[in-house]
Image: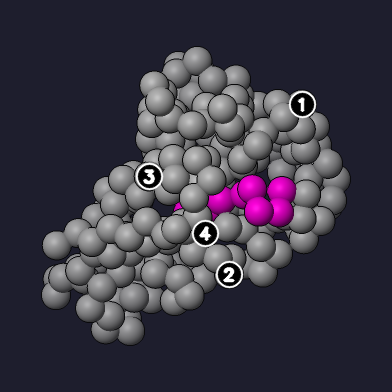
Amino acid sequence: MKRTAILISGGGSNMVKLVQAMVGDHPARAVIVGSNDPQAGGLAKARDMGVTTFAIDHRAYQGDRAAFEAALLEPLLAAQPDILCLAGFMRILTPAFVQRFQGRMLNIHPSLLPKYPGLHTHQRAIDAGDAEAGATVHLVTPELDAGPLLGQARVPVLPDDTADTLAARVLVQEHLLYPQVLRRFASGDQTPVLLNAA
C-alpha cells in the first residue's frame, strides 16, 4: 500500500477526490494532508475524512524558502509517504525539496502542458484562441510545470467562455483525472491517462 501525502493551499477539492478514491482495492492510502495556510478550507475537509493534517504558515518565514521547506518537511517525512501529491499547492518548491521526492511527487496543473505553465492559464487559452483547454497531471521536476506527463484531460473552449466558466469545466475533469492517474501511478504504471470531455 503506497502511503500518500497531499499538499494544498485552499479549498482542497482535488484533495477530497483523491482521498475519496483511495479506498477498497486502491493501491494507495492518504496518510497526511498539509497546507501552507492554516486557514485553508481543505484542512477541515481532510480531518472530516479522518486524515491527519498540518499547516506551516509560509508568511512566518518572510521569503526564507529553505526555512519554510525545512518546517514543511518535518511532519511530511514523519508520515513516511511513498507518494507526494500537490493539489492546488501554491508555493514554488526549491530544487532541493523536489529532488528529495524525485520520481514520487505529482502535480495537477490547469492547462494542457507544455502550454501555459504558471498562472492565469484559462484566460491565456481564451486569449490565444485555442479550441481546447484542459488539465495535466505530471511528475514534478525542478523546472516549473515541466515534468513528464502522467495524464491529460481535454475540454473544448466555447465561444462565450470566460476564464471562470472554462475553469469550472476544467475542474470537473481534474476531479476525474487526478484520482485515475494516482491509481495507475501507485500501481507502478506511468502510462498517461487521457480523458476527452466532449
**First in residue order: circle 2 vs circle 1:** 1
Distance from Cα at disc 4 to Cα at disc 1? 25 Å
Compare residues 59 and 169 and report the one nearer the observer: 169
Asked if residue 30 shows in the view, the reply is no
Q: What amino acid is labelled 3 in the image?
A: Gln
Compare residues 14 and 192 and report the one nearer the observer: 192
> Which residue is found at the position 22% from the left and 78% from the top?
131
- Density class for disc 2 (Cα within 10 Å; few <14, some 14-19, many ≥20) is some
Q: Which residue is mark 1?
A: 78
**First in residue order: circle 2 vs circle 4:** 4
**Res. 154 image quadrant:** bottom left
> What's the mark number on residue 138?
4
Q: Which residue is mark 2?
A: 146
Residue interval drawn in magenta? 101-110
**First in residue order: circle 2 vs circle 3:** 2
Q: What amino acid is labelled 2 in the image?
A: Ala
Q: Residue furthest bottom?
A: 128
